[in-house]
Amino acid sequence: MARFAVLVFPGTNCEGDVLHAIEAVTGQPAALVWHKEGSLDGFDAAVVPGGFAHGDYLRAGGLARFSPVMEPLIRMAESGRAVAGICNGFQILQEAGLLPGAMLRNVSLSYVCRDVRLRVEANSSPLTCGLAPGTTLRMPVGHAEGNFRADDDILEALEADEQVIFRYCDDGGEASDEANPNGSRNNIAGVRNARGNVAALMPHPDRAYEEALGGVDGRRLFESLHRFTES
Amino acid sequence: MRDAATLEAAIASGLSTEEFRQIGTLLGRPPNPTELGMFSAMWSEHCSYKSSRRHLARFPTESPRVIEGPGENAGAVDIGHGLAAVFKVESHNHPTFIEPFQGAATGVGGILRDIFTMGARPVALMNSLRFGPLSVPKNRTLFTGAVAGIANYGNSMGIPTVGGEVFFEDCYSLNPLVNAFALGIAPADRIFRARAEAPGSPIWCVGSKTGRDGIHGASMASAAFDEEAEAKRPTVQVGDPFLEKLLMEACLELMQGDALIAVQDMGAAGLTCSTSEVASRGGAGVEIDLDRVAQRETGMNAYEIMLSESQERMLLVVRSGREAEVTRIFDKWDLDAAPIGTVSGDGLLRVRHQGRLAAEVPCRALTDDAPAFDRPAARPSWWPSPEVTPADLPEPSDWNAVVRELAGSPELASRRFVYEQYDHMVRSDTVVRPGGDAGVVRIKGRDLGIAMTLDGNGRYTARDPRRGGALAVAEACRNLAAVGATPVGATNCLNFGNPERPEIMWEFTEAIAGMTEALEALAVPITGGNVSFYNETEGQNIFPTPVVGVVGVLDDATRRIPQHFAAAGDLLFLAGPEGGDALGASAFLKEHHGRTDGRPPKPDLDAEVRLGAFLRAAGAAGLAASARDLSEGGLAAAAIESLFAPDGSRLGAGLEVECADRLEGTLFGEGPARALLSVRPGDAETLARLAAREGVPLAAVGSVGGDALRIRVNGSPAVSVDLDGLADTFRNSLGRLALE
């Protein structure tokens, strides 16, 4: 059995979606953990869900790293357990220094909510360990600041080290400009850390886990996360 | 108390001589300046509904499902499973014209507070918008600003925006409309009401601090605009969705227990309105001390504190002895919460400030005793509008060009540019996304789905208010039927011009009459709503624009009818009465001929009832592969909308129609009570039997498939538009116009 922690900051709004998706897909227990908690003892993995933590004041995810729960989260990452971020969770993990890069506003300067297609680039992460590279998945995005930036050196190292785990692509699997919803460099939609236990993506697998929602491809990410905790 | 206010001050604050005299009679003395301000806000059109109250009483408001009808913060209907849907629509027109981003954003904030005040967790938003033509730069600023503001607020709150509408007409250039709708879910037996009972109970002010913003917003929204609108910018509130998210979570957490007697949102007229309404509904009084109200600015006087419309505040009536629970929960969410007074038994609103009595007014004088007018109404001399028939129109030479033009027109093009800025998937319950006839959210763990739609057509109502009112209700119910849902309740936002003009009052009463006829025929009760008068700028009134929001239930959300063509080879059927080729006040007339005249189609309410029953039965039996109602743009628009699915997939279609006369009416006519269905070939016979049983005419009109939209008329090719080009035109035109 694996126990999943779903972190909740003031302004987080996808905690219920993630909780429900984990339980529905993996059958494993998950619990909401308030940001003022000082411990994540007893959890095998943590997911930082989407939303607007601390109102996204200063910058998206910028204030969340000062929340008490970040200390045990960082220790969890250092211990090699799985830490995953979705959307605002991605931004929070970047701001906390657990993942590389930073997010700018979308090139459209607008929030964008629509289905995108993703290509799996590497299976060396908690979110992709059950997926073959080259697999394409469809799920919604919903963000105003998902425009992934890193300077050339970092970007080159990320690519060389296979730390890019998802890229926006078109129906044919091509990482084209048209398929890029926010202007991210190299169409990057998701990355992992060097050690391979912290990973995040901007799209929402927690909005694509049942046919009723228009797609089930998000299930594969939660299945991977479950598999990772058992490895 | 301090000096008495003068008649001049009363008139300057929007009251009439007669109203000033009446206040004196009610108080037995002249009001002081603070009291005058309170009366001016509470007796404004916006708060008192003084020109509309008598007419609104005509709406049907009862059904076995209605838990809470008009009069509370929002209406509530029983949706089964022990649950209630709590919903309402409200306007934020005037603030949006002054400052589009904040004006529209705080409209969303306000309607959400109305919902969670009732103890319901908001699960869906919609909005209905009107702007002037996008060819004018200022209109583009208003449109994009309002959409961004709505997106900012709703997205931050984590509530999906699942539907809505937007239209463009000259008459909205100086007076855009922003109507925001919200829907929440609550246990049916735990609806909170805003009634102060039990004298001695503490009254708390929670949420944001009170500042000088929005003072006299209610009065501003109750007057026509002139070129001084810019000077009214400080009367627009500034929203903080993050704070409201915390406030919502704290209130809902507190409402899980029984520490609260009542909750009242602080919206228009702020502390004045919330205290006097909560007290007069409960037949009680209220005593408050303004020194205990958390303030974000120094030196505010009683007048300013009582009339501030600072956002994200709530008034709580707490059970005596349970204050610690309030403190504990609001501390958790890092929000201000302070007791500011108590419920009293004498029916008075007594306000203290800096140790002095600042105001003392009977609560009912501010609320129930507000004036109610039966303003004169007069039918304008131009009525009725002459009919428009194809014979009056030059015949188009290139029908392909007309189809492309209409598909990319502001009236009919995809609203993707708008709804992709709204988070419509958060909460992972959206099973029919925007871009369909109605939005549908499911309830996790149950089969139940809730469908909702907002509809109104100002062009129709302008040319025939009674027909326009009836058609708005009919279209909303038809939209619900097109996803397979049964309407259970309705809310409405009545956007009209200056009620002091008899022809405006005629439009208003006629529209209500038409709406009432349709609501009764379709057995849908009104559970609440909002009236926005004085939509007049520099003497120009808007089209009368009643917007109707109807909520429906789907017993099994997985049985919703899809909104896009499903498979090549499926057969197309047009359901509903023949002779739906009416072109008066149609989208075709407006977009192709630049005319907004003519008379809208005659409602056929019996046919609407039959069509609704047929669509629901077809949906429940799984016979409809897709359905679309026919409304603006008629058959052609319904077909175009069905081609492009939200997942990016697309399917062509070949329509086969018979046409004895000119083609315009057949393709673009807007006759009511009709829908376009696609059906698997093996189901066609069963569907035909079902239609016959329900008394709905059904005509075979072609099939799904191919790489184009093709239309054959009387067996000969008339239209062939390739899918790639049409997709770009339909999906991207509105964005191009907006960002030009």
Image (cartoon, rainbow, N blue to C red):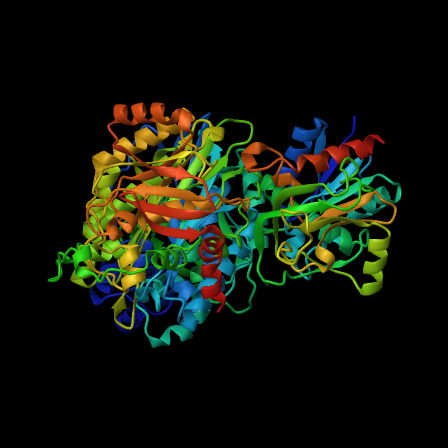
Q: Residue furthest front?
A: B716
Relative depth, front residue between B710 and B609: B710
| Whether residue B193 can be seen here | no
The number of callouts visible is 0
Residue at (50%, 26%) from the top-left corner? B447
Give the side of residue B434 with respect to residue B492, left or right: right
Q: Residue furthest left?
A: B381
Give the side of residue A205 with respect to residue B431, left or right: right
Q: Residue A205: image x %, image y %?
A: 66, 41
Relative depth, front residue between A46 and B376: A46
Q: Residue A215: image x %, image y %?
A: 59, 37
Q: State whether residue B612 is above or below residue B709.
A: above
Q: State whether residue A145 is above or below residue B713.
A: below
Q: State whether residue B721 is above or below residue A3.
A: below
Relative depth, front residue between B110 and B718: B718
Residue at (69%, 53%) from the top-left corner? A175
Q: Residue A78, located in which quarter of the rendered image?
A: top right
Q: Quarter holding the N terminus of chain B?
A: bottom left
| Whether residue B726 can be seen here | yes
Give the side of residue B479 with respect to residue B20, left or right: right
Q: Residue A200: image x %, image y %?
A: 74, 47
Q: Residue B519: image x %, image y %?
A: 26, 39
